[in-house]
């Protein structure tokens, strides 16, 4: 499947270290990512260390554990994070080799944090396939608005 890069950004009235922490710490991550899994919960398993494996998961259909198998490709503290999605989690099982996993993997998701005059612009660049584009175009603006509310509190 053909991948395309989609872009989202938001200005947050907080220093980038606070925005970074709000975006990546477990408790607040679970809050701002709620729009990606309406009616369920979302979280990550692993850590944000460069080179580490990280799972982005949530309760999916019928309470199943679904999500993404990923690697943290690059980290520049408070400036940039690059995630490479390499597979899927379906019903709690990691899958990096099936046709479903190969439809989109590898796909990159990058976060850039730019501070100016005490405020931070968060830029999100994400590779996706047409099948998921509309969902992300609906979910990302809501998620970034949640992130803004949390970081500005």
Image (cartoon, rainbow, N blue to C red):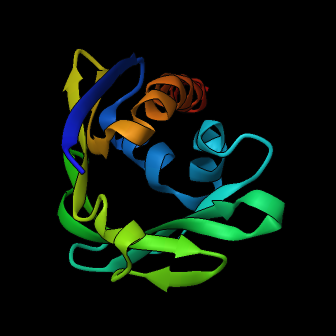
Q: Please report the residue visible at 50 percent of the width from the left and 44 percent of the height from the top.
A: 22
Say left or right for 70 vs 62.
left
Q: Please report the residue visible at 42 percent of the width from the left and 17 percent of the height from the top.
A: 13
Q: Is residue 53 above or below residue 30?
A: below
How many numbered discs sit on the rendered protein? 0
Where is residue 6, by image quadrant?
A: top left
Q: In this view, does 52 lie above or below 113?
A: below
Task: List x then y, in percent, for residue 87.
Answer: 37, 72
Q: Which one is in front, 99 or 57? A: 99
Q: Which one is in front, 134 or 17? A: 134
Say left or right for 141 vs 98.
right
Q: Which one is in front, 152 or 26? A: 26
Task: List x then y, in percent, for residue 76.
Answer: 16, 56
Q: In this view, does 123 lie above or below 89?
A: above
Of the 4 image quadrants, the one containing the C terminus is top right
Q: Please report the residue visible at 21 percent of the width from the left and 78 percent of the height from the top.
A: 51
Where is residue 72, by image quadrant?
A: bottom left
Q: Please report the residue visible at 31 percent of the width from the left and 35 percent of the height from the top.
A: 16
Say left or right for 19 vs 29.
left
Say left or right for 39 vs 26.
right
Task: List x then y, in percent, for residue 96.
Answer: 35, 80
Q: Can residue 19 be seen in this view?
A: no
Task: List x then y, in percent, for residue 148.
Answer: 51, 25
Q: Can residue 100 be seen in this view?
A: yes
Q: Which one is in front, 88 or 81? A: 88
């Amino acid at each position: 499947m053909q991948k395309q890069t989609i872009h989202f950004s938001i200005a947050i009235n907080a220093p980038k270290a606070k925005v970074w922490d709000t975006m990546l710490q477990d408790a607040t991550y679970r809050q701002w990512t709620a729009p990606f899994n309406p009616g369920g919960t979302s979280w990550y398993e692993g850590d944000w260390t460069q080179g580490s494996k990280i799972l982005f998961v949530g309760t999916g259909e019928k309470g199943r554990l679904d999500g993404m198998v990923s690697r943290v490709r690059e980290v520049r503290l408070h400036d940039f994070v690059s995630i490479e999605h390499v597979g899927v989690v379906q019903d709690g099982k990691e899958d990096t080799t099936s046709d479903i996993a190969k439809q989109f993997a590898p796909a990159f998701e990058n976060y850039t944090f730019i501070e100016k005059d005490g405020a931070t612009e968060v830029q999100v660049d994400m590779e996706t396939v047409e099948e998921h584009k509309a969902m992300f175009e609906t979910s990302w603006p809501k998620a970034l608005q949640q992130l803004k509310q949390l970081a500005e509190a």
